[in-house]
Image (cartoon, rainbow, N blue to C red):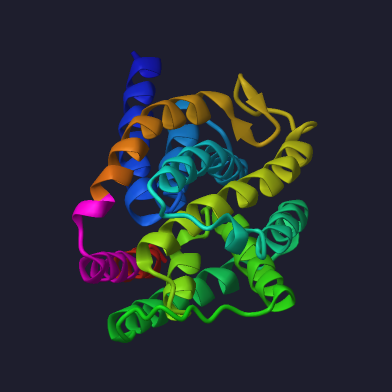
Amino acid sequence: MQILTEAVILLLAGSFVGALSGLLGIGGGLMIVPLLTYLLIHFHQVAFDQAMLMAIGTSLAAIIFIGGVSSFFHTKRNNMSWSTATHYIPGVFLGALATAFIIPHLNITFIKHAFIVYTFIAAYEIFKSPKIKSAVQLPSFIFANLYGFTISSISTIIGIGGGTMFVPYFIYHKVNPRLAIGLSSSLGVFIGLGASFGFIKNGLYVSQLPQFSIGYIYLPGLIFIVASSLIFVRLATKWIHQISISSLKKIFACLLILIGLSMLFAG
């Protein structure tokens, strides 16, 4: 009964995460991490610190598959520019890889509060941003990678695919919101790849982790979340063309505000 309950919860979570990824370009880590932390503590009696690390590691591993499928369907529907994405990939991958190895030594509280402030600023910028123009204004290769490194480092700490930061960033630089969402999905894959190496290595020799874990990645959580999310990713990439650009921007801004408030009141 316990196994069935856990599976149902993970499948439902995966469905919601898949819809968010396809529609808004985010990996859903802000939902996966607290949920998995609770399940690992409640069902498997994992210590809080280890449960948190496993939840973050599993969330980032899931983003490899969710973001990969999302970016595939966005590419099919012309919501993707791989020439733009390649400017950011090296910094994104290295930032996630480096942070995954040093995460036990970082001040998580400071990063958390900095992220909360960022969500409100980003929401404001999206609400007031001018009408999208044809002239996209992106930085040079070096600055693109510096930004990618920073965002992927923060995303690795929190366990997210970076969409809540990449999408506002691309919209601010006058990228069409649909294209910004496709770009965010693709970059999330490289955050997941870089981070997963570190979380597997860090947890390989840790004792008292649940069965079916590889380092700090909990395989049942990964499998159930990914399985249900992939169905809804495909559906959501179709829905995105039925929503106006103005509405997409407002939806994303409101989501940022909700995420910021939830993290703020969570203490």
| Residue 157 seen by the camera | no
- Residue shown at 74% from the left, 52% from the top: 97
Q: Outermost residue, front direction?
A: 134
Residue 130 at x, y = what percent? 32, 86
Question: In which image quadrant can residue 126 be found?
Answer: bottom left
Residue 87 at x, y = what percent? 67, 65
In the image, residue 97 above or below residue 116: above
Question: Which image quarter is the C terminus in?
Answer: bottom left
Does residue 14 appear to the left or right of 111 in the view shown? left
| Residue 109 seen by the camera | yes
Question: Which image quarter is the N terminus in?
Answer: top left
Main SS, magenta residues? helix
In the image, residue 70 above or below residue 175: above
Question: In which image quadrant can residue 147 be found?
Answer: bottom right
Question: In which image quadrant can residue 58 be found?
Answer: top right
Magenta segment: does it hold 166?
no
Magenta segment: does it hold 244?
yes
In the image, residue 24 above or below residue 73: below
Does residue 127 appear to the left or right of 37 in the view shown? left
Residue 255 at x, y = what percent? 30, 64
Q: Which residues are magenta?
A: 240-256
- Residue shown at 47% from the left, 55% from the top: 80
Residue 79 at x, y = what percent? 41, 55
Q: Outermost residue, top direction?
A: 1
> Disc count in the image?
0
Closer to the camera, 153 or 74? 74
- Residue shown at 38% from the left, 62% from the top: 266
